[in-house]
Amino acid sequence: MSELWELTAHEAQDGLRTKEFSSVELTESVLARVDAVEDRVNAYITRTDEVAREQAREADARFAAGTATPLTGIPFAVKDLIVTKGVRTTAGSRMLGDFVPPYDSHVYEQLKRAGAVMVGKANMDEFAMGSSTEHSAYGATRNPWDTDRVPGGSSGGSAAAVAAGECIAALGSDTGGSIRQPAALCGVVGLDPTYGRVSRFGIIAFGSSLDQVGPIGRDVEDVATILDGISSHDPRDSTSDPAPRPDMRHYLGRDVAGKKIGVPREYFIEGMENGVRTRIDEALRHLESLGCEIDTDLSLPMTEHALAVYYLIAPSEASSNLARYDGVKYGLSERGGSMWENMEQTREQGFGDEVKRRIMLGVYALSAGYYDQFYLKAQKVRTLITNEFREAFTRYDALVTPTTPGVAFPVGDKLDDPYAMYLNDIYTLPSAVAGLPALSLPCGLSEGLPVGLQIIGDVGAEGTILQIGHAFEGALGEANTLAPL
Amino acid sequence: MYDRAMPISRDQVLHIGRLARLGLSDAEIDRLTVQLSDILEHFEALAAVDTGDVEPTAHPLPLQNVMRTDSVAPSLARDDALSNAPEVEDGLIRVRAVLE
């Protein structure tokens, strides 16, 4: 008989509603699983067992009272840049090692309102800067499929926790691929929503024109259900889209025959692993068998510039956002010298290497004499990338690509070569730069490790990509998103 | 100017490090000079993209300025707002002198 922690969120909901088991039992099963595997995975920075037990009791009361929602009683991992009142929130940084937020983020408010259960705060690359979760001040997270390998990043703790059974579902955040890339490397499903769909209120800022919170789960239905639960207009985020949100689950199970899918050739480049290519080719045949019209004769020539555009714009925004860590208002505070000395000491102690590197890159791109050449140029090419996608979506319902060029790489492999690390995001950056929604879901294994399929949609077209993803998942058969740990 | 190689010099890295007030060590300056040069070299292709009359994108959505009514509502209590401050005095954050 399978354990409760192995269930998807919708399977767990079925069991909770029919009183087959209680939320307390489900939560205890997950907590016992965390006890059993966490020393090998390190998915969490802070465990919140007592919060989880309290919330599980409340969830059971809601099932008894008939006020449960589709997320009630579901144990979640919450990425540690999502601010949680009274629960330490570090963003993976020494800078916020003792930071206990006095308020809740919008998304955590939504989870609490829905009756969800928080198991812990998930590990991440410091301030979401990284693609391997090795840049965490709280130790690297390991990939549950092979603990000598990275889980991807920056939401590596969230994705690893879902794959290892250390939660049922998770929240991550995506700036240039930070949900989709770890979801792909850990063999789970992750969605980066359209920019503006999920409120950024209470999300520790990295790149404000790019950051977006999104769900990570064991199947497409779970991810759709979580998006419904966390996505609503929030007047506290001036970039929150006021448009109504259609129910994502309406799109699931609908026929995808006749859907036009473009496969841009720029995503099939040198450096892409053969095993990935094989799985993606198979995935395209699956989609064809579902009646989708696949067009591989598509070129998006601006794709090759997305990496430079992203790694100029995101660090520029980060250099501005992270200027707030000055040792004065909150966070680490080195004291004993002048104001300027203290500020330098605080940052020297508080920031890790990758964060310092990105701040330097951003300050350089924004500095007098280089602004036009780097930052402004990147913003203009960002327009061209966006226009190219916009034109493509007049002809296609969705674009399909690999999520990453390769499977999970060994721990330490790219730590000393920042540019090689950046290249891991090469397929997830273009849609992020354009603010488009994109889904990553498992499409099989290569050398025993998961391969991710990416489905990119037009602005606001989460429904379409979830519909296609759901049909694909069904055609592939058993999703098998739990790692053999 | 756009088409020539533009690795960053050690002096420039030192200057930027001071602007950002990161308190970088000499070893960090050396390492960052190599790493940032490598990264920026890979970005050179961007210069060749024709962006003649292209408008820059600061933001992916065509959002208008959001206005709200100026209504009185409860906000974070002072003690809560100060709960993470390193040094507090009389309900205020105590700071070092900016001007000596």
Image (cartoon, grey):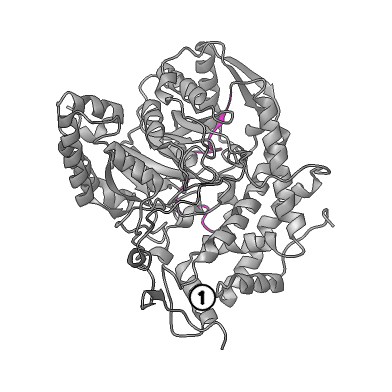
- Left/right of residue A67 with respect to residue A162 in the rendered view: left
Residue at disc 1, secondary structure = helix
Residue A395 figure quarter: top right
> Residue at 35% across / 59% down in the picture?
A101
Can the viewer see residue B4 in this picture?
yes
Residue type marked 1? Met
A409 falls in the magenta region: yes
- Left/right of residue A373 with respect to residue A144 in the rendered view: right
User: Which chain is home to disc 1?
Assistant: A
A40 falls in the magenta region: no
- Left/right of residue A478 with respect to residue B19 in the rendered view: left
Can the viewer see residue A143 in this picture?
no
Instruction: Measuring from the top left, give residue A138's x and y in whole percent.
Output: 37, 60
> Residue at 45% across / 30% down in the picture?
A441
In-front residue for pair A337/A288? A337
According to the picture, the residue beneath numbered tag 1 turns out to be A343
